[in-house]
Amino acid sequence: MTNDRLERALECSNTDDVPFIPAIYEHKAWFVNETPSRVARDADLLAKAMVAEYESVQSDALTVGVDVYNVEAEALGCEVIYYEGDDTSIPAISAEGAIYSEDADFKSMRLPDPEKDGRMPVNIEAARRVVEALGSEVPIRGALSGPFSMAANLVGPERLFMLTVTNPQFVKDLLIFAANVAKRYGEAFVRTGCGVVVFDSQASPELLSPKMYRQFVLPPTRLLIDYFHNLGVKHVPLIIGGNTTKILDAYLNSGANNLLCDFSADVHSFVVECSKSKRSFRRNIDSSDFLNVSAEDLRRRTLKAIDESEGFPGYVVGTSVVPYGTPLEKLKAIREAVIEHRSGGAGRQCS
């Protein structure tokens, strides 16, 4: 069963079953012939899209979310731009959407209610429906914004980077507040019977220095992930895009037991360090050319990516974010290459 395959990988158990988890967010809408803006605002459409996604792709986990970085910020008051008609653009935070200034008192600020505020209820209701429909077949995880990415929406990305230098205490207080928002939203997902996955790519070393990551981002991230583990959530993935090789030690110290090794990161370093700590990671195939590349090229690319696992049993094949409108044959080519490896591969073991 799919659940067993992913569970074995997350536990770094000896197996030759490589799980496959493509990053399908706004592309969900394509499976029901809708736009991301409509699916992102409709629990019924989102649930139907996720069921169609699973039936079509047969991935080893599903994520509840379309524009995964916007939901908490919108519930707190940021403006999200939606696109009407047939416009398939991805919902986005307004350029004038930042809402917090340096005099904000985060200790007395109300946390949003996941059952009432913004689109949180849309995603929670979709999670309930998908868990009921598919929960016995495949893990379902609710998408949460990580502390730094949420904070970037709340005060503006450029301003947040400046504040790490000019007002570091404000940033630390804001990140704790953001972590508390994610805790409450995540609790609502957990009550539906699904897990959580934390996205924090604004904290990538390509945007934030490794020193800043360790100083500002790691402490609240660790608190957030420990919180869910204490709630009984066994596996909490942490998704940071870009080349995270420079922060791999801190990444491993986050408490997350499934990391992301993006296509620009050094896969060998992940294999070595994750083998030592028996920590699983997902290796992304670059999806930027999925609309144009051939299915056969993707098959070869996938087999090459699996070869790079060096037999590590905690290895998961993934993709960077799949563009809206990607033909199904492209995702099937990756899945079929994974299945080809499963039928002919040798067992993988932790060192």
Image (cartoon, rainbow, N blue to C red):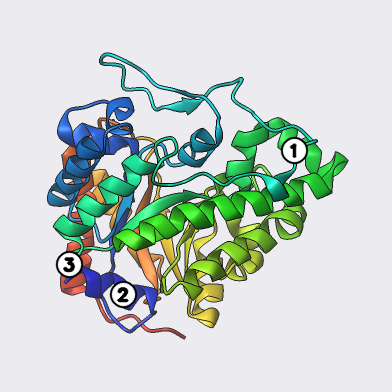
330 or 112: nearer the eye?
Answer: 112
Q: Secondary structure at mark 3?
A: loop
Mark 1 and mark 2 lie on one chain; the one further toward the N terminus is 2
Residue 125's mark? none
Residue found at x 48% / y 67%: 228
In percent of the image, x 33 and y 51: which residue is there?
A: 63
Nearest-to-viewer mark from 3 and 1: 1
Residue 149 point in image, percent of width and height:
59, 44
| Mark 3 touches mark 2? (CB < 8 Å) | no
Quadrant in the picture for residue 312: bottom left
Q: Position of residue 165 (x, y in %)?
A: 85, 43
Give the alpha-carbon distance from disc 3 to disc 2, as whole Å.
Answer: 13 Å
Residue that mark 1 sits on: 104
Q: Earlier in the sequence, mark 3 or mark 1?
A: 1
Count residues near mark 3 (Cα–Cα under 10 Å), then give few for <14, some for 14-19, many for 20+: few
Query: Would you name the residue on which mark 3 appears?
Result: 136
Q: Amino acid at mark 1?
A: Ala
How packed mark 2 is, by other alpha carbons closer than 10 Å (few <14, some 14-19, many 20 or more), is some
Q: CA distance from mark 1 to mark 2?
A: 42 Å
| Tag 3: amino acid | Ser
Residue 157 in the image, given as x and y percentages of width and height: 66, 34
The residue closer to the viewer here, 195 or 320, is 195
Q: Is residue 33 left or right of residue 117?
A: left
Q: Are marks 1 and 2 in contact (CB under 8 Å)?
A: no
Instruction: Tell me which residue sits at (49%, 79%) in the image.
Output: 275
Q: Which residue is mark 2?
A: 7
Q: Is residue 312 left or right of residue 133?
A: right
Residue farthest toward the top in the current orientation of the protein: 85
Q: Is residue 186 left or right of residue 28?
A: right
- In the displayed structure, 217 sits above or below 17; it is above
Amino acid beneath label 2:
Glu
